[in-house]
Image (cartoon, rainbow, N blue to C red):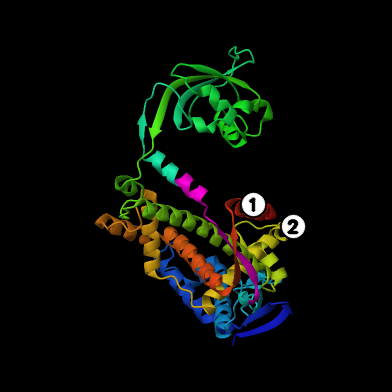
Amino acid sequence: MATVTRENIGLLNDRITVKVAKEDYLPSFEKALKNYSKTANIPGFRKGMVPAGMIKKMHGQSVFTDEVLRTVEKQLSDFMQNEKLEIFAQPLPMMENNPNQLNVNEPSEYAFAFEIGLKPDFKVADLATEKATRYKVTITDEMMNEEVDRLRLRHGKMTDPETVTGDDNVLNVTFTETDEEGNVAEDGVKKDNSLLVKYFAQDFRKTLLGRKKDDAVQVQLTKAFDEKEREWILGDLGFDKHDTAAAGKFFNMLITKVGLVEKAELNEEFFEAAYPGKGIKTEEEFRNTVKAEIQSYWDKQGSNHLQHELYHVLLDHTKIEFPESFLKRWIQMGGEEPKTAEQAEHEFPTFANQLKWTLIIDKLVRDNNIEVKPEDLQAFARNQLFSYMGMPGGAEEQPWVADYINRMMQDRKFVEDAYHRIQTEKIFNWAETQINATEKPVTVDEFTKELEKHQHHHH
């Protein structure tokens, strides 16, 4: 009779020994051999007429080894199932196992040992006692006016005036690199661009007023642009945006066209163009919609930041012990290619962090019945499609939309990816309701600085 024993050999690390006796594997070995002789193709013999002794001589050892190992594996998996063992990865065969002990001519009792890493029992950090900050960006009139202006320009009409009259003129220009005297530089940069007059530095704009098509202006980048716009222009001309030498270069700027966008008027036609289907009638409703859109964008950013904090709270304040030596061995043996002990040592911290996060997620999902339903996956596919196509979320369903969704539901990679993302989102939404977050009103600048602080933390 087969026996299976289990002993502890380290933290969350057990050894399971499977002993099999002759009667455990011989019947199945003989049966396998018989089947083999029925199908073996050996020159000089009709199929199925090969003598058993000859089959045993030729293939006996390999069939024997297969059958013994199959019996051992079955005993091992039955044992783990009956004991309800929660393990990492798969059992690893111990070094002392010697397959050469198996001899078809002298069947006897064989023992094989395996090492397992057990999943730890742990408590997830108690979010109710943790502190976090939910940043809420204050939407200013200035932000709203900028957005209203942007929308009015975007939906405005382009006209072709004779001369430059102010900040809202659009100039199509050609930059040609020159020396200080205005002589064209050999192998210099030449590039077309199109700029609003208001992109130029305040002092420089005066020199542009009254200019026409085909006028040329001598420009030095440091003087013509303030820092933010200068970085953008430098990048466009093919330089590094922080290159101070390039910022000092001179260019001949030829105006090839003067345009002016007449801003759209604040009327129902414009409101409908800017926000289709919302039925906006008055300027007040329009401004409220603009404000709500900006607020919703920054609230989402605030929520992302809070979730980022939550991730760290859960990871850093949840204590989990791991069977380290087992996992390091598993990193060495478990992949496509064997790895050295040094490689395993090097990879372990990242591996352990990912493993820890996976365990936390699994536990939160189980303890709080967080589930991803088929309709969640379908909604995810629909939203993704609509955002690719630039369609509003509530667009009428057409038959092709349903076809597309059905097709995506057959795509295993898409479903796994979507499942994972929806599950993570649901976990964080749940976590947000658990944590004691203090709301803190901030300006856009303060919030951006806070985000940058976090990014530096992580690099």
Residue at point 43%, 52% (across, down): 290
Tell me which corner region of the image, top left, top right, bottom left or bottom right, holds residue 304: bottom right
278 or 194, which lies in front?
278
346 or 115, which lies in front?
346
Residue pointed to by mark 1: 449
**Helix, strand or loop under label 1:** helix
20 or 302, which lies in front?
302
Number of residues whose C-alpha sits closer than 10 Å to that of mark 1, classed few (under 14), some (14–19) or many (20 or more):
few
Q: Is 284 drawn above or below residue 53 in the view shown? A: above
- Mark earlier in primary sequence (2, 1): 2
Number of residues whose C-alpha sits closer than 10 Å to that of mark 2, classed few (under 14), some (14–19) or many (20 or more):
few
In the image, taking residue 51 as reference, residue 8 lies left or right, namely right
Q: Is 69 drawn above or below residue 6 in the view shown? A: above
Residue pointed to by mark 2: 342
Residue at point 62%, 56% (across, down): 337
Residue at point 62%, 64% (across, down): 309
- Three-letter code for the amino acid on which mark 1 is drawn: Lys
Q: Picture coordinates of residue 364 (x, y %)?
A: 55, 75
User: What span is colored magenta in the figure?
Assistant: 129-147
Q: Picture coordinates of residue 82 (x, y %)?
A: 55, 85
Is residue 134 on the magenta stretch? yes
